[in-house]
Amino acid sequence: MTIDVKEQDGVVIIALSGKIMGGPEAGQLNDQINRLIDEHKTRIVIDLGGVEWMNSSGLGILIGTVTTLKNNDGQLVLTHVSERIYNLLKITKLLSVFTLAENLDDALQKF
């Protein structure tokens, strides 16, 4: 998994690519989120457009991210959610946990 971070209109955009499978990658994303919270940047979009696959550990990373942000008065929006990941969220009954947007412009409008 690779992590690319940029900021637009006061919102941090984290573009993930590759496979989200947990392990050391979970720590990398978690560390990044905690650094952003320390900088009072709690409006975050995670762009999943480049994600090929996500397992249950990867899903746990996203759940941890949304929980951490909510506990710090922040908000998370997921964008470019593939059909495969959407179905994973649906099967696990987690659709209501996440705010989804079709594209980056829609995601920025959610704040």
Image: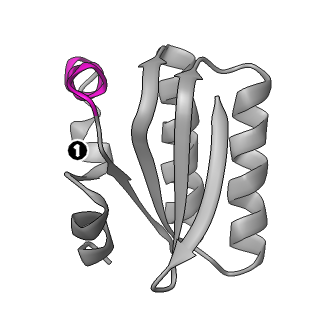
Dot 1 crowding, Cα within 10 Å, few <14, some 14–19, many 20+: few
Relative image position of residue 98 (x, y in whole percent): 32, 48
The residue sitting at 29% across, 38% down in the picture is 81
Q: Is residue 48 left or right of residue 22?
A: left
51 w.r.t. 42: above or below: above
The residue sitting at 69% across, 43% down in the picture is 29
Q: Among all residues in the image, which is located at the extreme bottom? A: 9
The residue sitting at 45% across, 34% down in the picture is 50
Element under label 1? helix
Type of residue at label 1? Ser
Of residue 35 and residue 102, the one placed in the foreground of this image is 102
39 w.r.t. 107: above or below: below
Looking at the figure, which quarter contains the C terminus? bottom left
Relative image position of residue 14 (x, y in whole percent): 55, 55
Relative image position of residue 72 (x, y in whole percent): 59, 70
Q: Which residues are magenta?
A: 82-91
Q: Main secondary structure of the magenta part?
A: helix
